[in-house]
Image (cartoon, rainbow, N blue to C red):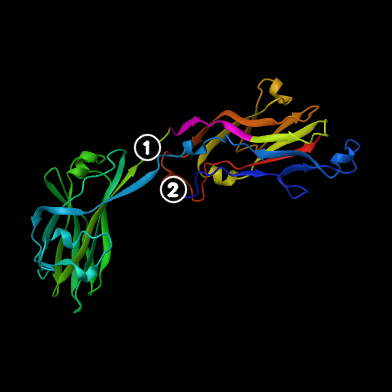
């Protein structure tokens, strides 16, 4: 579910010389000394202290799988194979073993098993849904197997929709509860630890089989941020001139993945600051880079030999929803920047 994410992509301009340089010297320039001939006007390198764009993302979704570990309140399905042990251990394997271990019935009315499951090892985060999976089969004679997922919570049993499987071939089906069916609100971890899961099973024919039952708990690993907020701050580029150049420079920063950003953001306004630029002494001292303008421009006057840092110092954003399932396919929350330095 969460797609691309989280690695900041900084694109440094590559011109003429084929290296990570924003501009190459022109050998016709009268400002070039012999030692600098064929060198580079300036470099624009990605800074280490990049903004943490991951902080804009909604909470990460994770899944915990919980399997039967003991008999539940009901063990009514006709038989098990092998005969030794208990029903719950015939359906508890992590990798389905199909006809190696299973419970089965020859009854045309539903029979029921419930199983206790292991307590959660997570215990924190908002629970989005509980899904019960079951793997079942009909019979070779064309018999139809019928099955329903079950949960038992607060002493009441709730059924999923009826599923059918024709022939002696196992298939996995499921049913999900996005809220606790007893309370009508989001599941709690206490309810998960008290939960029993199970299966209703019947046949139209000779036998119906079930080889696996388990639950998946989907939860959010942290609190989702606000839909609107302040952009993360940090350094983007370190701009260093050639030691032999002492003239004026023009620095442009482009936002290169606007289309992908618009699939996640309603708006994104990034305040860029270049130390010792002409703009740094003005009010405001920053240039605003947005989804609408796509470029910010800075001027460095009489630039001589000292590395200057171009940074994100603030700004604001609004995302489409606090659930990235609502965002358009191909979205990104991570701006990609291209820095170009030229002689002015």
Above or below — where is 242 with respect to 209? above
* Residue 57 visible in the current orientation: yes
Element marked by disc 2: loop
Q: Nearer the viewer, residue 115 or 241?
A: 241
The quarter of the picture where residue 104 lies is bottom left
| Lower sequence index among marks 2 and 1 | 2
Above or below — where is 293 with respect to 82? above
Q: Nearer the viewer, residue 252 or 65?
A: 65
Disc number placed over residue 222 in the picture, else none: 1
Q: Which residue is mark 2?
A: 2
Magenta residues, as a range? 226-236
Left or right: where 10 falls relative to 241: left
Contact (Cβ within 8 Å) of mark 2 with mark 1 = no
* Residue 159 visible in the current orientation: no
Which residue is painted at 14% across and 53% down in the image?
A: 70
Q: Nearer the viewer, residue 279 or 177?
A: 279
Relative image position of residue 176 (x, y in whole percent): 27, 52
Disc number placed over residue 271 in the picture, else none: none
Left or right: where 238 falls relative to 181: right
């Amino acid at each position: 579910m969460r797609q691309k994410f989280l690695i900041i992509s900084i694109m440094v301009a590559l011109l003429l010389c084929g290296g990570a340089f924003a501009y190459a010297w022109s050998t016709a320039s009268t400002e070039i000394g012999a030692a600098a001939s064929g060198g580079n006007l300036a470099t624009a390198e990605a800074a280490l202290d990049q903004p943490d764009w991951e902080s804009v993302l909604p909470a990460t979704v994770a899944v915990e799988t919980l399997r039967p570990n003991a008999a539940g309140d009901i063990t009514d399905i006709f038989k098990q194979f092998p005969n030794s042990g208990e029903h719950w251990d015939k359906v508890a394997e992590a990798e389905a073993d199909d006809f190696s271990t299973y419970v089965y019935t020859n009854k045309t009315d539903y029979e029921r098993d419930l199983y206790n499951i292991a307590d959660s090892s997570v215990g924190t985060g908002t629970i989005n849904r509980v899904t019960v999976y079951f793997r079942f089969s009909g019979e070779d004679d064309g018999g139809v197997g019928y099955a329903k997922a079950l949960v038992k919570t607060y002493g009441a049993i709730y059924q999923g929709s009826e599923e059918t499987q024709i022939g002696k071939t196992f298939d996995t089906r499921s049913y999900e509860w996005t809220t606790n069916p007893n309370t009508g609100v989001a599941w709690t971890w206490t309810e998960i630890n008290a939960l029993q899961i199970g299966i209703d099973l019947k046949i139209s024919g000779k036998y119906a089989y079930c080889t696996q039952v388990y639950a998946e708990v989907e939860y959010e690993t942290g609190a989702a941020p606000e839909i609107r907020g302040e952009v993360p701050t940090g350094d983007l580029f370190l701009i260093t001139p050639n030691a032999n150049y002492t003239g004026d420079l023009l620095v442009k920063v482009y936002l290169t993945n606007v289309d992908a950003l618009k699939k996640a953001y309603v708006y994104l306004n990034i305040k860029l600051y270049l130390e010792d630029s002409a703009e740094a002494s003005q009010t405001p001292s920053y240039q605003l880079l947005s989804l609408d303008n796509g470029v910010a421009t800075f001027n460095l006057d009489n630039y001589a030999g000292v590395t200057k840092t171009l940074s994100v110092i603030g700004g604001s954003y609004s995302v489409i929803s606090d659930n990235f399932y609502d965002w358009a396919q191909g979205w990104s929350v991570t701006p990609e920047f291209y820095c170009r330095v030229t002689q002015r």
